[in-house]
Amino acid sequence: MASSWLSVAAGTVVGVGIALARRYFAGGVCRSTALMAGKTVLITGANCGIGKATALDLAKRQARVIMACRDLKSGETAARDIRRNTQNGELVVKHLDLSSFQSIRDFSSEILKEESRLDVLINNAGIFQCPFMKTVDGFEMQFGVNHLGHFLLTNLLLDLLKASAPSRVIVVSSSLHKRGVIHFENLNMTEENYDKRAGYSNSKLANVLFARELAHQLDGTGVTSNCLHPGIVWTNLSRHVSPSRLVVLLFRPLIWLFLKTAHQGAQTSIYLAVDPELEKVNGKYFGDCYEKPFHPVAQDEGVAKKLWDISEKMTGLS
């Protein structure tokens, strides 16, 4: 009898421990109940993962959600799925290939012609540790998509954001930006010196520096710019480094315990988009729905300004 009670007690302790650990690794939750009726939100990469989860939540809050997707068919499928879960939420699916400056310009031109306002721009799409590839315009893919694509898109939509103020720009970065380095003599890696891990970290550091410099330039306009780390999320972003099926089966319990779902990973993006108390918060870094300190590598204002100037030249804005 005693051993039976001990087994039950041990099982209860283990169960509670697992539940607490799962809750801890799930991260912060957006507690705001604010609605978004009458507001328009644009999300890049909204057809899957964190982007789709963000679109679903904001559609439930009655926002008009523009889903900017490279794969239009996948985007339409995601929109149908979201409508089924939001009583026919207002969703617009548009094609956007962030690896092509022409696609970004065409997309932005359509938005400026068709939309009377833009309240929130969420730069969410990205590519993670891919083999060496180049964008249509000849840039290393991770730097080109994660940084230059969003840099150009944001700048082309700035006038509409300003006209819709108070409005918000949200940049989805990663805690791996702490490992990044901005080598101005080698921003665009060549195949010979390519390191996909360094390339990703560098592009995410560029995201943070861009968000900070944008915040500086937008000061006093009513438009804010903030960036975030969504956490370690199990999505198809990691498709280029996906483990074998056997490894997934063996470690699925650990994946479930330590990695966030797309819904959990979207919480900070949602928080930055909807919380009324953040209307005037500008130039900050967030994680798990809390403001976090900037890592030293992201605090050099001179580097941020120089990266901005070079990015203008690379994208043809200057």
Image: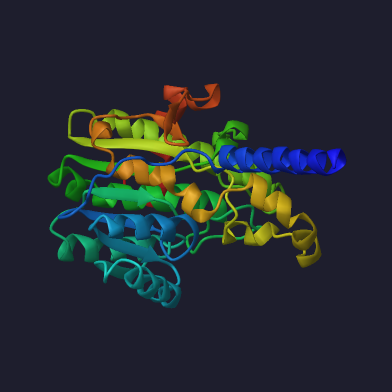
Horizontal placement of 126 versus 10: left or right?
Answer: left
Q: Residue furthest front?
A: 1
Q: Nearer the viewer, residue 44 or 64?
A: 64
Q: Position of residue 141 (x, y in %)?
A: 55, 56
Query: Considering the image in quadrants, where does the C terminus appear?
Result: top left
Q: Classify residue 276 by image quadrant.
A: top left
Q: Position of residue 306 (x, y in %)?
A: 43, 31
Horizontal placement of 171 versus 17: left or right?
Answer: left
Horizontal placement of 181 versus 221: left or right?
Answer: right
Position above or below: 218 against 123: above
Q: Nearer the viewer, residue 192 or 13?
A: 13
Query: Considering the image in quadrants, where does the N terminus appear?
Result: top right
Q: Residue at x 44, y 68 (%)?
A: 70
Q: Is residue 312 something that shows in the picture? A: no
Q: Nearer the viewer, residue 48 or 308?
A: 48
Say how the picture is coloured.
Answer: rainbow
Q: Classify residue 243 by image quadrant.
A: bottom right
How many numbered tags mark residues here?
A: 0
Position above or below: 156 against 181: below
Position above or below: 97 against 16: below
Q: Position of residue 56 (x, y in %)?
A: 36, 60
Q: Is residue 54 something that shows in the picture? A: yes
Q: Residue at x 13, y 46 (%)?
A: 163
Q: Position of residue 259 (x, y in %)?
A: 62, 48
Q: Residue at x 52, y 61 (%)?
A: 135
